[in-house]
Amino acid sequence: MSLIGKEIVEFKANAYHKGEFIEVSSEDLKGKWSIVCFYPADFTFVCPTELEDLQDQYATLQGLGVEVYSVSTDTHFTHKAWHDHSPAIGKIEYIMIADPSHAISVGFDVLDDEGLAQRGTFIIDPDGIVQAVEINADGIGRDASGLIDKIRAGQYVRTHPGEVCPAKWKEGAETLKPSLDLVGKI
């Protein structure tokens, strides 16, 4: 069942962030746009390339008022060890949430049969409502640059009721106003 348009599941979890262990809850994701990026496991192969790519987009995302959270079923201790030993992960400035209980992964419907999180990316609005979801097979890495246009489109639609963003929409481009006179003319 799709999570689009639904409020995120309530959770409280340990996390690793900038050399410290912190607690993060679903309430922390509210009041701003958030990206939650699930990945299978620390100390693996595709995962560090994705998380490093997300870090490469982090400043731009923060400039758009977006906070980023990565989540795996590893512990916060494992996140710290990976951060300390991997050059790619050592760059990460965003919050790395631990989900060893699998509660968050189950709540976002990305837990696989082996007890690992699938490659799920969620864009969440300031009300805690899921606006976009992408889930990739284990061997297919994600490109974080596409998140920027999705965030901008989500922010535009939120502040411009009655307008929608067409395919390949870029900030400043024309939008559509769904109406009877547009039916069949696009």
Image: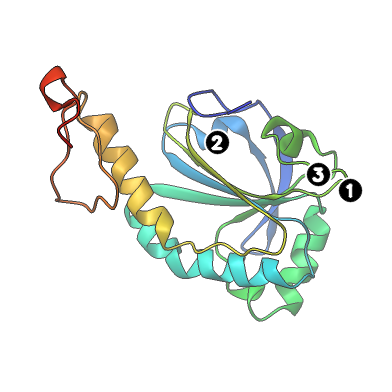
At numbered mark 1, what does the secondary structure look like: helix, strand or loop?
loop
Foreground of the two, 46 or 66 = 46
Q: Could you say which quadrant of the image residue 84 lies in?
A: bottom right
Q: Residue at x 47, y 49 (%)?
A: 67
Q: Residue at x 16, y 28 (%)?
A: 177
At numbered mark 2, what does the secondary structure look like: helix, strand or loop?
helix
Residue 88 appears left or right of 161: right
Are circles 2 and 1 on residues that touch, CB within 8 Å? no
Q: Could you say which quadrant of the image residue 32 lies in?
A: top left
Which kind of residue does numbered mark 1 sit on?
Glu
Residue 51 image offset from top left, x and y in percent: 60, 65
Which kind of residue does numbered mark 3 sit on?
Asp
Q: Please give the residue where the numbered disc 1 appears in the rendered image.
A: 114
In the rendered image, the vertical position of residue 43 relative to residue 111, given as above or below: below
At numbered mark 3, what does the secondary structure look like: helix, strand or loop?
loop
Disc 1 crowd, CA 10 A, few/some/many (<14, 14-19, 20+): few
Instruction: Report the quarter where the C terminus lies.
Output: top left
Q: Please give the residue where the numbered disc 2 appears in the rendered image.
A: 28
Residue 121 image offset from top left, x and y in percent: 57, 48
Q: Which residue is drawn at 68% across and 66% down?
A: 47
Foreground of the two, 118 or 104 = 118
